[in-house]
Image (cartoon, rainbow, N blue to C red):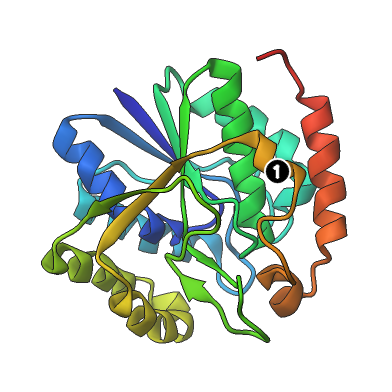
Amino acid sequence: MHVVFVFAHQDDEIAFVSRIRYSVARGDRVSCVCLTDGALEVDASIRDAESNRVLAKLGVSPLIVDEHRIADGALPEHMDRALAFLERVAVEADEVVTLAWEGGHVDHDAAHLVAVVFARRHRIRCLEMPLYNGERMRGPFFRVFNPVGDGWTARTLSRREHIANVLLARFYRSQRRSWLGLMPLMLLTRPRELTRVADLARAAAPPHEGPLLYERRFHYAPERFAAHAARFLQRQASPD
């Protein structure tokens, strides 16, 4: 089986570590595709190297990236380009795994839509996994590995595996400030892997009630994202 993991940024693989390990142990071919340059504050080559070190620890090949990459934070405006890139590189995919529809970061939700449209085109399963979101939180606060909505399947991890997964974040040295704050939160979460079959019907509504995290932290209006998403889905509409 060829499993394609679709990231928005370098370091998003931290959301999928348990699933990547599972796929490798199952003998799957694993490809990891990154849709943006992740270069909002640090050069893309530095961030690529950090992610590739983590992927090497997991026993999989380096990130697949586009020569002409989409800027960090601009994925909602360029989902068609991202989909075309995914079509070129995700050859003979049997399953796609991507970030959850959860309102944490605009690029994460855009990557979700790109991956789900790709999977629907090819009639393959697409799984989503949570990373972070601000459901029932205020201000800049958020939860990590917190599922939004229902329909999730939980796979219990050993405490040892959970800790080993989280500690891989130490390799993201250029993002040290962010990860020093995130790692304690991640270590305190329950040792489990959450997956859910992605469904485009969920994209007809915001991921959850109340202000979304990307609205509160990054001042990106949900209406702006919804407009880009609606145009993208309309352009890419195809019969089931």
Q: Is residue 23 above or below residue 109?
A: above
Which x, y percent locates residue 21? 22, 47
Most extreme residue toward the front is: 150
Q: Nearer the viewer, residue 38 or 20?
A: 20
Residue 230 locus on image (x, y percent): 83, 39
Query: What amino acid does circle 1 point to?
Result: Ala
Q: Position of residue 29 (x, y in %)?
A: 27, 29
Left or right side of 87 for 95: left
The N terminus lies in quadrant: top left
Residue 210 in view, yes or no: yes
Q: Is residue 69 visible?
A: no
At horizontal 69% and vertical 56% (from top left) the residue drawn is 71
As drawn, is 104 to the left or to the right of 94?
Answer: right
Q: Nearer the viewer, residue 237 or 176?
A: 237
Task: Give the vertical position of 38 relative to 66 (above or below).
Answer: below
User: In what element is the residue under mark 1?
Assistant: helix
Q: Is residue 63 left or right of residue 213?
A: left
Instruction: Quickly name the residue at label 1.
Output: 203
Q: Residue at x 46, y 77 (%)?
A: 175
Q: Is residue 175 left or right of residue 80?
A: left
Identify the residue at image location x=66%, y=42%. 202
